[in-house]
Image (cartoon, rainbow, N blue to C red):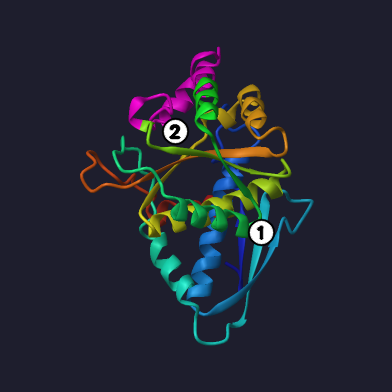
Amino acid sequence: MTGDGLDLHLDSSRPVDVTDPDARLATLSCGAALHHARVSLGAQGWRATVTRMPDVARPEHLARVQADDPAPKPIEPLMVRREQTIGLRHTDRRELSGRRVGADALAAIITAVHAQGSLLHVLYPNQVLDLAAAADLAQGQTDETGWLAELASWNAGPSPTGPHDRPALFAILYGRGDQPINWLRAGEALSAAWLTATEIGVSLLPLSATIEMTHTREAIRVLLTSVGYPYLVLRLRTTDQDDAGQARQPQLPIDQIPSPSRSA
């Protein structure tokens, strides 16, 4: 934070070398943080100007958020609700037993993604089988032992091949380009979709295994008929209070979040 602005930087020590060598997933995560910041500023009554990739000579400088004059009153209730939802949003890796996501809920999530400049393609049942095949390929046909270790650490969620996921919807978050600016915007779309889903009782689980390897990423692109570039696969399920297991994955305490001042 500098003066009346916020600068978003990619911490080069955070991306993992094997599963995310070009930092596409790390950049996507930063995009989610950027959207969270935009929501929080709006809920507190501020207008903000966002400049993405402000310095071509410093690609790790992902965005500059300038706090402008306070927004006209009253504050939009949606922004206040979304800021509250940030504290509730979590990764739910349980084997859920809820109902299939309804048409209205799905439409709300798609609208949230489109509003951030990305797209969402919901897979047909036969395409889910192709997704499962790509997931099996990603997890079982690699000689990279380091990749498998990172996968086990970061992506311990359920595979789309299991019978417990039959009521789930799977969707591909994608866009028209495959550059850091697109990955950043995809992260903003992920945040918007996740907050919307949380508000309407839908569990959203991001699955990255099929995106982390070039050949499986190309296989996923075929499911888009090659009209776009996949950024992430999302599993959507309704939530059920009777689902067993721990719903929330712990998040980093505020004092462990990397910052330029602490890493200097």
Q: Position of residue 125 (x, y in %)?
A: 49, 30
Amino acid bearing label 1: Ala
Whether pointer 1 and pointer 2 mark residues with C-beta atoms closer than 8 Å, the reply is no
Secondary element type, mark 2: helix
Badge 1 or badge 2: first in the primary sequence = 1
**Mark drawn on residue 154:** 2
CA distance for labels 1 and 2: 26 Å
Specify the quadrant that holds the N terminus: bottom right
Q: Please provide the residue range marked out in magenta.
A: 135-164
Between residue 186 and residue 29, name the one nearer to us.
186
Amino acid bearing label 2: Trp
- 23 up-or-down from 147: above or below: below
Q: Is residue 28 left or right of residue 167?
A: right
Residue at left offset 63%, top offset 40%:
24
Residue at left offset 24%, top offset 39%:
245
Residue at left offset 55%, top offset 29%:
127
Q: Is residue 114 left or right of residue 193?
A: right
- 18 up-or-down from 116: above or below: above
**Mark drawn on residue 118:** none
- 189 up-or-down from 174: above or below: below
Secondary element type, mark 1: strand
Q: Is residue 89 left or right of residue 226?
A: left
> Residue extending furthest right?
57
Label 2 Cα neighbours within 10 Å, binned few <14 / some 14-19 / many ≥20: few
Residue 162 inside the magenta-drawn segment = yes
Residue 47 seen in the current view: yes
Q: Determine which residue is flagged by label 1.
A: 63
Residue 110 inside the magenta-drawn segment = no
Q: Position of residue 131 (x, y in %)?
A: 53, 27
Residue 261 seen in the current view: no
